[in-house]
Amino acid sequence: MEPSITRAILRSFFKKLDQAAELDVALVGAGPSALMAARVLAAAGRTVALFERRLAPGGGVWGGGMLFNEVVLPADLAPLLDELGVAHEPAGEGLVTADSVELAATLIVAARRAGALVFNAVTVEDLVVRTDRVAGLVINWAPVVRQQMHVDPICVAARAVVDATGHPGEIVRLASQKGGLQLETPSRGVPGERSMWAEMGEVAVVQHTGRVCPGLYVCGMAANQVGGGYRMGPIFGGMLRSGRKVAELILNDLADA
Ligand code: 48H
């Protein structure tokens, strides 16, 4: 039986990897904004994959606020939580709370069930570029990168790449520094996020979500790196809205192309 188990895993895994070799959308990171975006894009029929360096997708949701495993969301997102099946409780001031483990797990399942491929323990270490655009991702096993093994990566092509790497905003920096691409951001660079101002940060993260150069988009905390927005702490409405916004922009752009 053991050979059958091995072959079953290999066949199924390589079928997924083969599908990911040429994608409509490749998302770097699988935090809340990326998971939300992947769900919307996959539900619209696009081929989508998430590449996440950690073993567990979900990004910063699991830990709630300072490891108190609850997160806060604006009450107007209660219908979305109901649609996803995430329990929530009123918390005053137009807010609700939700169990962070339930939210993280649900966002992962929702993205998968919509048809998004998930590659965990995979680090995006570089971009595939052409003269004027981003054309794909350079990927390697996260433990290989962490151990600094001298192992060449492989690539996946994508019509749209999304930097959803959270606070570091790694991919946009790579595009401008190493890829030599001209950023369309207001500062033409990456000014970095600002200190805590929850209300402003929640709005800014959605405002700064969008295209940064042909083929490359940014969402979630990485968008605040690019736009110089405030941070907001453990309130996740902006992340979910940002993911939805980037997905809708990409769907429009791909339809026009
Ligand atoms: C593969 C990578 C790579 C790489 C990073 O940080 P995240 O949860 O992302 P967002 O932006 O959807 O959500 C941000 C939120 O969790 C948060 O931090 C908030 C609201 N902070 C507010 C505040 O004030 O602090 O997830 C990003 C994911 C992580 O899982 C990384 O491991 C992964 O991206 N990642 N994966 N290749 N090069 N870089």
Image (tube, rainbow, N blue to C red):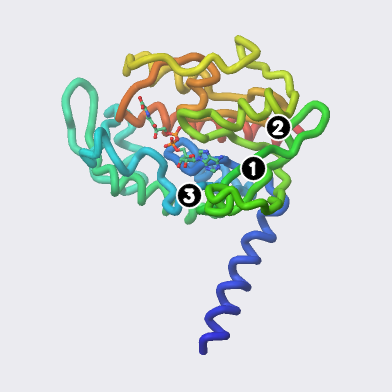
Specify whether 118 is left or right of 108: right
Q: What residue is at 55 percent from the left and 19 percent from the top?
A: 226
**Residues at marks 2 and 3 touching, judged by CB atoms closer than 8 Å:** no
Residue shown at the point (50%, 27%) measured from the top left: 222
The residue that disc 3 covers is 111
Label 2 residue SS:
loop
64 w.r.t. 195: above or below: below
Residue 39 image offset from top left, x and y in percent? 50, 45
The quarter of the picture where the C terminus appears is: top right
Name above or below for residue 211 compared with residue 108: above
- Dot 1 crowding, Cα within 10 Å, few <14, some 14–19, many 20+: many
Q: Amino acid at mark 1?
A: Val
What is the residue that sits farthest to the bottom in this orientation? 1
Relative to 254, is 205 on the left or the right? left
Residue placed most toward the observer, 209 or 120: 120
Let me know if residue 116 appears in the view. Answer: no
Q: Quadrant of ligand 1?
A: top left
